[in-house]
Image (cartoon, helix red, strand yellow):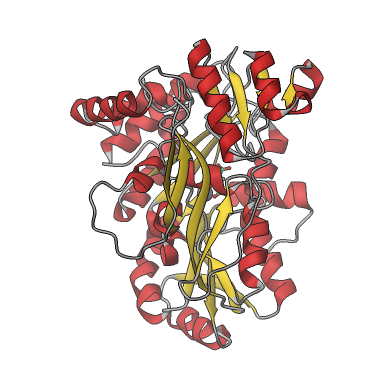
Amino acid sequence: MIAGLQAVVGTEHVLLDDDVKASYETDWTGRFTGRASCVVRPGTTEQVAAVLRLCTAAGAKVVVQGGNTGLVGGGVPAGGEVLLSLARLDVLGEVDLASAQVTAGAGVTLADLQGHARAVNLDVGVDLAARDSATVGGLVATNAGGIRVLRYGSMRAQVVGLEAVLADGSVLSRMAGLAKDGTGYDLAGLIAGSEGTLAVVTAVRLKLWPRLRARAVALLAMDSTEAAVALLPGLRASLPSLSAAELFYAEGLALVRKHGGLPAPFPVEHGAYLLLECADLTDPVEQLAAAVSEASGLVDATVATDAAGQRALWAYRETHTESIGAEGVPVKLDVSVPTSRLPALVAALAPTVQGVCPAARLVVFGHVNEGNLHVNVLDTGELHDEVTDAVLNLVASLDGSISSEHGVGRAKVGWLQLSRSATEIAAMQAVKRAFDPAGTLNPGVLLP
Ligand code: 2HG
Ligand code: ZN
């Protein structure tokens, strides 16, 4: 099989040396790691197809990887698989202005795609902190969310066309980008969010949005999560330009200040912080300032008008992940509940985690509009499964989802039944068998 792979992609793109493979074998969190039998780096869709034909024929298992920014172990080997890296599929098509769409190879980074779209006054609907490394293929395969979901939806909602290779090497392609297409099953929508278990995404066609250069950012302080959630209806109604609403707390603020050397945003600590961003064609600062001054339940607020001030406020939110990572390897649980139940979730988290792991340190933050909380637990020692179990059961008891935007991966596969019924899991397994009967793709990810 190795000789066959070398013949397809060239010897230099089949990595066998342990040192060279290492950066592909551990995920961003450092929690998930395993050895790959080899790393294969095809440069075209045809090469991906030939690689998959060879692997399936040899009975080899394949793990698919984009920018390796995943947080649930879905893109790194468990042990012995072929690691298929799509990083070289980085061709960006010309933007189609008539439809406001673009075709991008799976290996194009989000930042490159954003730059490409912005050059013609358009923009990508999804944005997230890992933009410089995260790739389009992985964003689609995991249905990534990020900081603009409240305005533009998740990655699946951006997809108007998709090319993917099935495990047997056949190529499924639907790239015309038809805005209306009533011909049956939405296979692109199904593959989006399937975490590499159904097919290998090699290219996507994405819808683009008008570029909104004028931005305003505010950081609000309030006493509680309840107060933050209570603000949402009024903010959405009075701010059609609202494009982000991000929540964090004093523990996370202390960590980002410690690791980033950031100044305190307010003279005293508060119960909850909400970062808002508005984006529009004309300057939204006044709109935002008016909405903030009318909002009830605020104890402090600051509005940034210039780009440097906006970046400084965003840093409090966007450096959470790396600041937590600098403290140790956390248990990361990306969950969502109906937004109205977010205060109940936040209130119950500390006692729930301490009940199973008294030494644990909890840092939570998230995307408030979607009821999406990033529960990061440090210092869990050997108790990561116990902590995971307690938190995910709490989430399920509040009608929530055990994975909001990071996917199930390997991290939560044992808990899928908390969010999906037996009937749903059986239907998902039947779909998996239809696409990948030999079970080549991403075994151990998503499905038990
Ligand atoms: C974010 O919102 C990402 O910044 C990462 O989804 C969340 O590190 C995390 O837990
Ligand atoms: Zn997030």
As drawn, 311 above or below 434? below
As drawn, 314 above or below 295? above
* Image position, residue 215 (x, y; %): 60, 77
Q: Quadrant of residue 115?
A: bottom right
Residue at figure coordinates x 60%, y 58% from the top left: 269
317 to the left or right of 260: left
Residue at figure coordinates x 42%, y 77% from the top left: 295
- Asked whether 440 or 306 is in front, the reply is 440
As drawn, 104 above or below 274? above
Residue 121 seen in the figure: yes
* Image position, residue 403 (x, y; %): 41, 38
Q: Quadrant of residue 92?
A: bottom right
188 to the left or right of 34: left
Instruction: Tell me the quarter of the image containing the N terminus.
Output: top right
Residue lying furthest left: 423
305 to the left or right of 158: right
Residue at figure coordinates x 72%, y 52% from the top left: 257
* Image position, residue 238 (x, y; %): 39, 81
Residue 360 seen in the figure: no
Instruction: Tell me the quarter of the image containing the C terminus.
Output: top left
How many labels were placed on the picture? 0
* Image position, residue 414 (x, y; %): 38, 21
As drawn, 64 above or below 239? above
Residue at figure coordinates x 64%, y 50% from the top left: 108
277 to the left or right of 325: left
- Asked whether 181 or 427 is in front, the reply is 181
